[in-house]
Structure formats: C-alpha cells, structure tokens
Amino acid sequence: MRFFSDNAAPVHPRVMEAMAAANHLDTAYDGDALSQQLDQRLSEVFDTRIRALWVPSGTAANCLALAALCPPHGGIVCHRDSHIQNDEGGAPEFYTHGAKLFLAEGEGAKLTPDSIAAVLDAIPDDVHRVQPHAISITNATEYGRIYSPDDVAAIGKLADQRDLGLHMDGARFANAVAMLGCNPDEVTWRAGVDALSFGFVKNGAMSAECLVFFDTKLADATLYRRKRAGLLLSKGRYLAAQILAMLDGDLWIDNAIAANARAQTIAAAAGERAIHAVEANEVFLRVTPDEAAALRAKGFDFYDWAPGEIRLATAWDTAEADVAALAAAIGAL
C-alpha cells in the first residue's frame, strides 16, 4: 500500500489512449497538430491569451521559466524549503547561467509579502550586490499548503511595485485549484503571475509538464533555451497528447479532487499528529521510529521526511480501501 509519492502513480488510462491515438506519422518536434493546439486550449482554460510549451519534467519547466524572468547576474526570491532550492540539483543556477536564489521564510513553505520584503529590503541597491529580478512561489507548497487568489494577489502586487517577475511552481497546481474551487485564472495571471509551471505528471500524465507564459513575450527566447537545453523532443506530439487528454473534460481537476479527498481521510485519522494543515494531497505526521516501523510492518510505504516526521502522499488512483486501512493503522498507534 504505497503512499510514498504521487510521482510513482500509474498513468491514467485516458492519457495512455491519447498517446496511442497520437502514434502515427506527423511533423517532428513541436510542429505537429497536437502541439499546435496547446496555445488555444490553454488560453481557454485560463481565459486569456497564453503561450504554452511542453517540457518533460517539472525541473525543466521551473528553470526555463526562471531563465526567462531573471538574467545571469540577477536573483530570485524563493522559500527556504522550495523545490527549486532543495530538490533540483542546482538546475535553476544552471539554466539561468548563475542567477542567485534568495531564501525567504514562511510557515508551511508559504511566502508572504512581508517575508519577501524582508529579503528584498536587506539587499543594498549597488553594483556589488546581486539584485533581485523575480519571485518564485509554489502552489501547492512542498508541505501541501495552498495559496489563495488573495494570497497570490498580495505577492503579485509586491512584485509589480518592485518591478519583479512572478513565477508559480505548479507541480501540484491541480490539487490547489481543486481545493480552492476557483477558476485557474483567479490564482494565476489575474493575481499577477507571469509564468506557471503547470504540473501533470503527479496527477496522471506520463512524462509531460507544461510551461505557461501569461507574459507571452517571455516565450520567444524560451523556445531557443528549450532547444539548447536538449529538451525539444523530436516526438513532442506524445507530450502534447498527454496534456490535451488531461485537460479534456477537466480530467486534471477530477484526478486532483480524488487525491485530495484521500488525503483528508488520512488527516482526519491523524488528528494532532498532523504537522501541517492538510490542504492538498500530502500529509505530514509526527511519529516515533517504532511507530513508523509498525506502519511499515502492516504494509504501508511512505517517505521519512525528517527525524520524527513522515510524509504520506495520495494520488489520483489511491484505493479507498488502502486509505481506510492506513487511517485505522494510524488511529491504532
């Protein structure tokens, strides 16, 4: 009974079917009929004109976005526990050709205007210091916390006042939108986001993420950066097919609703063991080593997050019976 990572979940059957349907001769790279549909289809999703580029990983989406927003001599404000800081192996610095990450604080890995301003205000405006050019936030955060439209708008206002670009790492963007019950535009461009890394792999896709530019001018140079980075796949239609299948009939939302609901069941059983409010599809619990061993002995797989802490992640296909068994096992500790 696996609660280790939503990255390990199976591919949704409708995504598989879409890839099979794309298995015919077409133009290579991103000139195929499916890739050419992405701009229009995602413009409909976000109710504004966008530019969309498929990429094979969330790291690629994040780092290409940051390279578009920040020059090599600049800096990017992010949370101390953000994915771009802790889990991308220096890729942001690599893709931006050396931009600096400025680390800010915030409960649940959420930034606030005040925590961002505290970092910005400590940087003297002179040639001897790296100057900030962008802010990067994650929705849902690494601890499963959600930025509301108002939360994002407050940061977007600060970014505008300070003349900074705003990037959103949306590896679990679907889970955030599903929890909020809002339209995708409300928590992105209407709130000031310039670029979104729209995640699909954790939510039922195989190997496709989407870089969405609300500031469409940013896409032009990114086409060249994607090629230079070795990310312009010759059979890109299979990535486009995955994204379109996930968008069709709001499968991306339905899958996220299912994953979020399973996490809520676990959270209800966890009670005061929960370290963070459960708002998406991740549950962080306080357990002793013996308690963690007891859960594993009953067949549960999960991630040891920190000493005395574990992470449980649900996915679109997590079985209700497995969740019920886990909830009972946690309750019995």
Image (cartoon, helix red, strand yellow):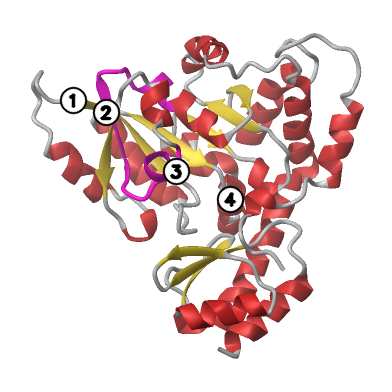
In space, the residues marked 3 and 4 are separated at their CA atoms by 23 Å
Q: Is residue 228 left or right of residue 315?
A: left
Q: Is residue 204 above or below residue 265?
A: above
Q: Which residue is mark 1?
A: 130
Secondary structure at badge 2 equals: strand
Is 4 rendered above or below residue 329?
above
Task: Please report the residue visible at 46 percent of the width from the left and 28 percent of the height from the top.
Answer: 63
Q: Amino acid at mark 3?
A: Asp
| Label whose residue precedes the other's in the sequence (1 or 3) | 3
For this orientation, the residue located farthest to the bottom is 332
Q: Which residues are magenta?
A: 66-88
Report if the CB atoms under discs 1 and 2 are less than 8 Å apart: yes
Helix, strand or loop status at disc 4:
helix
Which element carries disc 1, helix, strand or loop?
Answer: loop
Closer to the N terminus: mark 2 or mark 3?
A: 2
The answer to whether the residue labelled 3 contacts the one labelled 4, judged by CB atoms less than 8 Å apart, is no
Q: Which residue is mark 2?
A: 75
Q: How many marks?
A: 4
Is 123 on the left-hand or right-hand side of 35? left
Residue 144 placement (x, y as % from top left)? 49, 58
Query: Which amino acid does the dot numbered 4 rest on?
Result: Val
Q: Nearer the viewer, mark 2 or mark 3?
A: 3
Q: Which mark is residue 87?
A: 3
Of discs 1 and 3, which sits in the foreground?
Answer: 3
Spatial CA span between label 2 and label 3 = 18 Å
Position in image of residue 20 (x %, y %): 90, 31
The answer for how far apart the CA atoms under marks 1 and 4 are is 34 Å
In the image, what residue occupies the spot 66% across and 35% down? 45
